[in-house]
Image (cartoon, rainbow, N blue to C red):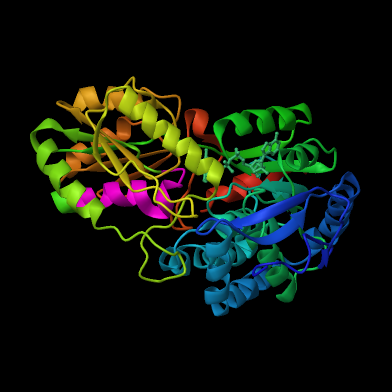
C-alpha cells in the first residue's frame, strides 16, 4: 500500500498503533485503490491523547512565547522544504490535482505556522487606570483544544487550527476526517521534528464517534470544527454542555454576483475558480452565480467554452486541472443532486456526467435558468456544479443573495467600485471578495455568519479564539 503511515495515530511525540480499533480503508479517489489502512482510536487511546495533551500544556504555557513561535517557524521551514512530498501525500489523501496541492495546501499550512509563530510574542494585555487603583489584563491560553477536520484540505485545516492554538500556549488533539486521515500525521511528525515537546499536538483517527468522545471530555477547553452544518450543530451542542469555547467553520451556499459592467473574462474566471477548484469541494465556493440579465447569454457561452477546456485526469499528472471527488459516497451525492437539478427544470449547459473508469470523477457542470427555490440553489452540493441565476436590479439581487440560512462567503464583480462596496456592505457573509474569489491568505480573517459558523480562523482575530482574558484588580 503506497501511502501506509508508520502507525494510525500520533500521541505524545510518537506514532502509536492500536489494532483494537475498527479498520478504516484509505482510498485513492482517482483509482479506487486502497492505499493505506488505519485503525480507529479506542477509548483508551483517546484518553491517552487527552492526558498527554493536558500534561504537556502546563509547561508549554509557561514557555517564553518567542520560544514557542520559533518552533512553529522551524516547522514551517521543514514543510516548505518537503513541499513536494507533502503535496503528493495530500493528492493521494484527497484526489486533488498536484497542480493545486503544490501551491495551496502544505504551503498554506506553512504560512499559518509562520504567521502565528511570529505573532506568539506579540500578544499582550492592557492596563486600565482606575484613579489610585489599576486593572491589568493577561491573555492566557485556554488549555487543551480539540480540532476536528473536514476532508477537503487535510493539511491546511490541521495547520490552521494547530498554529494559533500552539502559538498562544495551548495543546491540541486533532481528529482528521475518516476519509483523509494521512496528512495530519505528517503535520504532527514535522512539528515534533521542529522541536515541539511531546503531547502538544496529538492526532487520533476515527469516525464521528471519536470526535464526539473528544468534544465531550471534561479536560477539553475548546473545540474547533471544520465540517458541515449538521455536524456543527451536534458538536456545538456537545461543547455547550461543558461550556467550552468553540470555533465552527461550516458549510455555505454563497452568492457570486456579476453585474453587466464587469470584466466578463475575469468574472467567468472567478466563477470557475469558485466552483471547480478542488473539484468544487471548497466551503466558501460561490455556488449561486447571479448574472445580470443583459450579459447572461454571452456569459454562458464563454463559460461553457472555458469549462469544456478544463483538463480532467490523473491527479499526479501536473497537467491535470481537475481531479475526482474525494470518495464514491461524495460522487453519488453530487450525481444525485445533478439529477435533482434536471428534474426540477434547470437547464444543463455543460457536464453532468460521471466519467467512465474506476475513479470518482464528475465533469465540471453548469446549470442555467436556476431559480431560487430549486434544490441546487438551496443545498450545499460540494462538487463541481455551478448554478447560474439571472437578476435585474441591485436591490433584488441583494435580497435574493441573502435569502439563505448560510452566510459563509460572497463575491461581487463590477467595475463600479462604489456599487461593489455598497453591495458587499449589505451581504450577510463573513468572508467577501470584490473582483476576485476564494483567496484566503492567513492575514485575513476567515469564517462565516448565520448557520455557516462561529468565530474566525487566521489573522489577528484568532487570538480572541485561542486565549482567554484574566483581569487583575490591583
Ligand atoms: P462532516 O461535517 O461530515 O465532518 C466533519 C468532521 O466532523 C469529520 O472529521 C467528521 O468525522 C467529524 N464528525 C462527524 N460527526 C461528529 C460528531 N457527532 N462529533 C464530532 N465530530 C464529528 O463534513 P465533511 O468532512 O463531509 O466536510 C464537508 C463539509 O465541511 C462541508 O459542509 C463544507 O462546507 C465544510 N467545510 C467548511 C469549511 C470552512 O472553513 N467553513 C472548510 C472546509 C469544509 P468523519 O468524517 O470521520 O465522519
Q: Residue furthest bottom?
A: 81
Where does residue 284 sit, x and y in percent of width and height?
A: 43, 43
Foreground pick, 235 / 313? 313
Q: Residue visible at 74% across and 71% down? A: 192
Residue sitting at 73 percent across and 41 percent down?
A: 211
In-image side of 399 versus 134 (left or right): left
The quarter of the picture where residue 113 lies is bottom right
Left or right position of 457 against 13 = left
Which part of the image, by quadrant, shows the C terminus? top right
Residue 275 image offset from top left, x and y in percent: 35, 46
Q: Is residue 154 left or right of residue 302?
A: right
Q: Is residue 448 left or right of residue 339?
A: right
125 or 305: nearer the viewer: 305
Location of the N terminus (image quadrant): bottom right
User: Residue 316: horizontal and vertical position, in percent?
Assistant: 47, 69
350 w.r.t. 109: above or below: above
How many numbered marks are there?
A: 0
The residue positioned farthest toward the top in the image shown: 373
Name the residue rendered at 42%, 32% in the picture.
337
Figure check: 354 above or below 372? below
Question: Does the rendering let one see residue 428?
Answer: no
x, y percent for residue 349:
22, 39
Residue 417 among magenta residues:
no
Residue 280 magenta-drawn? yes
Q: Quadrant of ligand 1?
A: top right
Q: Main secondary structure of the magenta part?
A: helix
Instruction: Check the image and name the residue furthest to the right.
Output: 44
For the residue pair 331 and 285, the one nearer the viewer reads as 331
- Residue depicted at 76% across the width and 38% down the height: 209
Q: Which residues are magenta?
A: 266-284
Tell me, yes or no, if residue 419 can be seen here. yes
Amino acid at each position: 500500500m503506497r501511502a501506509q503511515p508508520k502507525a494510525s495515530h500520533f500521541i505524545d511525540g510518537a506514532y502509536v498503533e492500536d489494532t483494537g480499533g475498527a479498520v478504516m480503508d484509505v482510498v485513492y479517489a482517482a483509482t479506487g485503490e486502497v492505499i493505506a489502512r488505519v485503525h480507529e482510536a479506542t477509548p483508551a487511546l483517546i484518553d491517552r491523547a487527552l492526558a498527554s495533551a493536558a500534561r504537556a500544556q502546563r509547561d508549554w504555557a509557561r514557555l517564553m512565547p518567542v520560544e514557542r513561535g520559533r518552533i512553529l517557524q522551524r516547522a514551517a521551514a521543514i514543510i516548505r522544504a518537503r513541499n513536494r512530498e507533502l503535496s503528493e501525500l495530500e493528492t493521494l489523501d484527497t484526489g486533488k490535482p498536484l497542480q493545486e496541492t503544490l501551491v495551496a495546501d502544505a504551503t498554506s499550512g506553512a504560512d499559518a505556522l509562520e504567521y502565528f509563530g511570529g505573532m506568539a510574542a506579540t500578544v499582550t494585555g492592557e492596563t486600565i487606570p482606575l484613579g489610585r487603583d489599576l486593572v491589568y489584563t493577561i491573555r492566557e491560553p485556554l488549555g487543551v483544544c480539540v480540532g476536528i477536520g473536514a476532508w477537503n484540505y487535510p493539511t491546511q485545516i490541521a495547520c490552521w487550527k494547530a498554529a494559533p492554538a500552539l502559538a498562544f500556549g495551548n495543546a491540541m488533539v486533532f481528529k482528521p476526517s475518516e476519509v483523509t486521515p494521512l496528512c495530519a500525521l505528517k503535520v504532527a511528525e514535522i512539528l515534533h521534528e521542529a522541536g515541539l515537546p511531546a503531547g502538544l499536538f496529538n492526532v487520533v483517527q476515527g469516525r464521528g464517534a471519536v470526535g464526539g468522545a473528544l468534544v465531550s471530555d471534561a479536560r477539553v477547553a475548546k473545540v474547533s470544527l471544520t465540517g458541515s452544518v449538521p455536524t456543527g450543530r451536534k458538536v456545538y451542542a456537545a461543547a455547550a454542555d461543558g461550556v467550552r469555547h468553540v470555533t465552527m467553520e461550516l458549510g455555505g451556499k454563497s452568492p457570486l454576483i456579476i453585474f453587466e459592467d464587469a470584466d466578463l473574462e475575469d468574472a467567468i474566471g472567478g466563477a470557475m475558480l469558485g466552483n471547480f477548484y478542488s473539484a468544487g469541494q471548497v466551503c466558501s465556493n460561490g455556488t449561486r452565480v447571479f448574472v445580470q440579465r443583459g450579459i447572461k447569454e454571452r456569459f454562458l457561452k464563454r463559460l461553457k467554452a472555458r469549462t469544456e477546456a478544463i483538463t480532467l485526469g490523473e491527479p499526479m499528472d501536473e497537467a491535470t486541472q481537475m481531479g475526482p471527488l474525494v470518495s464514491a459516497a461524495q460522487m453519488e451525492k453530487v450525481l444525485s443532486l445533478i439529477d435533482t437539478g434536471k428534474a426540477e427544470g434547470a437547464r444543463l449547459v455543460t457536464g453532468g456526467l460521471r466519467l467512465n473508469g474506476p475513479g470518482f470523477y464528475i465533469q465540471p457542470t453548469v446549470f442555467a435558468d436556476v431559480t431560487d427555490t430549486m434544490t441546487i440553489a438551496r443545498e450545499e452540493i460540494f462538487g463541481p456544479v455551478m448554478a447560474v441565476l439571472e437578476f435585474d436590479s441591485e436591490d433584488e439581487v441583494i435580497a435574493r443573495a441573502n435569502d439563505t440560512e448560510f452566510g459563509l462567503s460572497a463575491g461581487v464583480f463590477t467595475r463600479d467600485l462604489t456599487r461593489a462596496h455598497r453591495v458587499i456592505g449589505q451581504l450577510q457573509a463573513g468572508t467577501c471578495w470584490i473582483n476576485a474569489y476564494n483567496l484566503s491568505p492567513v492575514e485575513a480573517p476567515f469564517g462565516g455568519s448565520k448557520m455557516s459558523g462561529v468565530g474566525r480562523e487566521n489573522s489577528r482575530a484568532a487570538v480572541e479564539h485561542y486565549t482567554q482574558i484574566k483581569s487583575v484588580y490591583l
